[in-house]
Amino acid sequence: MEEMLEVVREYIIEEYVEDDSEVTFDTPLISGGIVDSFSMVSLKRFLENKYNISIPDDKATPEAFDSVNKICVLVKEYIA
């Protein structure tokens, strides 16, 4: 889980953080304005490709994508 947390956090920093803001595992991503709805789609695609999973659209909610911790909990549900 620790490795997944770091992978997801680093991806978010590289793709969506434009300044030197600190992103922790609990930083609000959607509600904090770091990730928008378009970015959430690309993040979902990254996760599906990286972990060879399929996340149903009805599970890919703003609430489920609002922190690195929440994203990793969601991803773990679909890893065989």
Image (cartoon, rainbow, N blue to C red):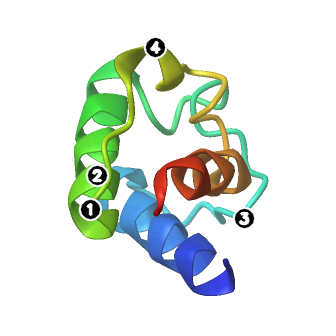
Residues at circles 1 and 2 in contact by the CB criterion of under 8 Å: yes
Q: Which residue lies at the image location 64% right of the left edge and 62% below the top edge? A: 23
Q: Are marks 3 and 4 in contact (CB under 8 Å)?
A: no
- In three-dimensional space, the C-alpha distance between marks 3 and 1, rounded to whole angstroms, equals 25 Å
Quadrant position of residue 67: top right
* Residue at the disc numbered 2: 48
Residue 43, image x and y in percent? 33, 45
Q: Residue furthest right?
A: 26
Amino acid type at circle 2 is: Glu
Q: Earlier in the sequence, mark 3 or mark 1?
A: 3
The circle on residue 58 is 4
Residue furthest to the front: 80
Q: Which residue is mark 1?
A: 52
User: For the residue labelled by badge 3, is the local secondary structure a helix, a strand or a loop?
Assistant: loop
Answer whether labels 3 and 1 touch (C-beta < 8 Å). no
3D distance between C-alphas at marks 4 and 2: 15 Å
Mark with earlier residue (4, 1): 1
